[in-house]
Image (cartoon, rainbow, N blue to C red):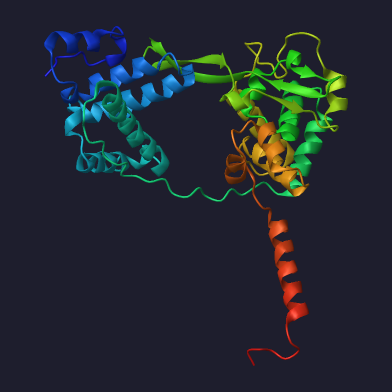
């Protein structure tokens, strides 16, 4: 067995490979710690900082502390089941969701698949013991709440946060895309918005707080996927507000207090306060994206165009994630159903 340092992320890129070459050991018998290091380093050049931060967190907090120096050829269906049970049995105060546990287990599988493909380890990759449950039905904010919110935002557009949220209300852009949006991205004459950046907070791999916990930092990167880099038409309802409050420079649409930009969690906090002022029950900022997509479909906009506006790679993602029938639409459907039977049913009841 190789004697490797505990913190795999502080080793030089080729440490594990060099140790493998010198000792001549079988790749299939390396530890999960060694394998995860090789995997992370091989993908680092292709991942965005946010993606690297997510996998680094999963490994250091959940995966490596449990598997310790377990050899990858000893990870079986049974041991994966035990791992999932361990994650599920954690303190209820920090209970992990079924979806999150599935993601953690999937990460272990990705590492093993990588070792098979790259180093021909010929190990059996266990199944993911936790299947994702069907996505819960999304309850959209009602029409009255959205109307109140839109009115408040329109009445207070001199505040850049309200103007920014109004843009999201009428375009369905993500909160990270709104954070990164500058006035140079908005072409009022052409009535289009360029979505070409995304702003998010990730874990700083090097810096530590005084209590030993990792610090975080704000990074600006390209949008979520290549399809997220897009041009969004501006609604005619937005044009007057943008013309009135536009700034002819590189300033961010939504500014921060200490920084020229407002990060996503700051916008989310401000959004929560705005909902309180409107007298509207709290809902997450991302629900604006759901509501926008649903409104577009209800108005008859074709789903292909909507998918491109939202920045999805295919229309199925749009239909599955962001298009939801409202209660009013469902009631209308039942009225049509009742009307059909009133026209076709005989005068006397069939069941009498």
- Report the residue at 14% width, 8% height from top: 22
Is residue 12 placed above or below 245 in the rendered structure?
above
Foreground of the two, 171 or 97: 171
Estimate the x, y position of residue 298 in percent, counting from the top left. Answer: 74, 49
Q: Is residue 344 visible?
A: yes
Residue 208, image quadrant: top left
Q: On the picture, is 214 further left or further right than 72?
A: right
- Report the residue at 86% width, 32% height from top: 236
Check the picture and name the quadrant holding the C terminus: bottom right
Residue 57, image quadrant: top left
Is residue 101 placed above or below 324 in the rendered structure?
above
Estimate the x, y position of residue 82 in percent, counting from the top left. Answer: 23, 42
Check the picture and name the quadrant holding the N terminus: top left
Foreground of the two, 281 or 297: 297
Residue 219, image quadrant: top right
Estimate the x, y position of residue 273 in percent, counting from the top left. Answer: 67, 32
Q: On the picture, is 124 further left or further right than 157?
A: left
Estimate the x, y position of residue 155 in percent, counting from the top left. Answer: 83, 31
Foreground of the two, 165 or 122: 122
């Amino acid at each position: 067995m190789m004697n490797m340092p505990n913190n795999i992320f502080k080793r030089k890129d080729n440490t594990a490979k060099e140790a493998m070459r010198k000792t001549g050991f079988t790749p299939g018998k390396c530890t999960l710690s060694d394998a995860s290091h090789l995997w992370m380093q091989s993908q680092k050049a292709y991942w965005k900082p946010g993606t690297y931060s997510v996998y680094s967190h999963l490994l250091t907090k959940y995966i490596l502390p449990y598997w310790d120096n377990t050899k990858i050829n000893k990870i079986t269906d049974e041991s994966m089941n035990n791992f999932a049970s361990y994650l599920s049995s954690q303190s209820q105060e920090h209970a992990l969701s079924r979806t999150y546990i599935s993601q953690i287990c999937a990460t272990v599988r990705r590492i093993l698949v990588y070792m098979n493909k790259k180093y021909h380890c010929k190990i059996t990759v266990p199944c993911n013991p936790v299947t994702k449950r069907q996505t819960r039905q999304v309850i959209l904010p009602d029409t009255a709440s959205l109307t109140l919110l839109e009115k408040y935002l329109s009445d207070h557009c001199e505040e850049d946060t309200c103007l920014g949220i109004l843009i999201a209300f009428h375009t369905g852009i993500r909160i990270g895309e709104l954070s990164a949006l500058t006035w140079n991205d908005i072409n009022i004459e052409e009535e289009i918005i360029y979505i070409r950046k995304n702003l998010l907070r990730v874990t700083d791999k090097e810096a530590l707080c005084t209590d030993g916990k990792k610090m975080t930092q704000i990074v600006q990167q390209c949008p979520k996927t290549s399809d997220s880099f897009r041009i969004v038409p501006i609604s005619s309802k937005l044009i007057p507000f943008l013309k009135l409050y536009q700034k002819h420079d590189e300033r961010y649409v939504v500014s921060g207090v200490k920084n020229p930009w407002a990060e996503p969690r700051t916008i989310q906090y401000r959004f929560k306060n705005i909902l309180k002022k409107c007298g509207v029950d709290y809902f997450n900022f991302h629900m604006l994206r759901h509501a926008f997509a649903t409104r577009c479909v209800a108005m008859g906009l074709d789903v292909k165009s909507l998918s491109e506006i939202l920045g999805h790679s295919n229309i199925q993602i749009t239909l599955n994630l962001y298009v939801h029938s409202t209660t009013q639409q469902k009631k209308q459907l039942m009225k049509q159903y009742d009307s059909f039977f009133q026209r076709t049913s005989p005068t006397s009841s069939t069941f009498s």
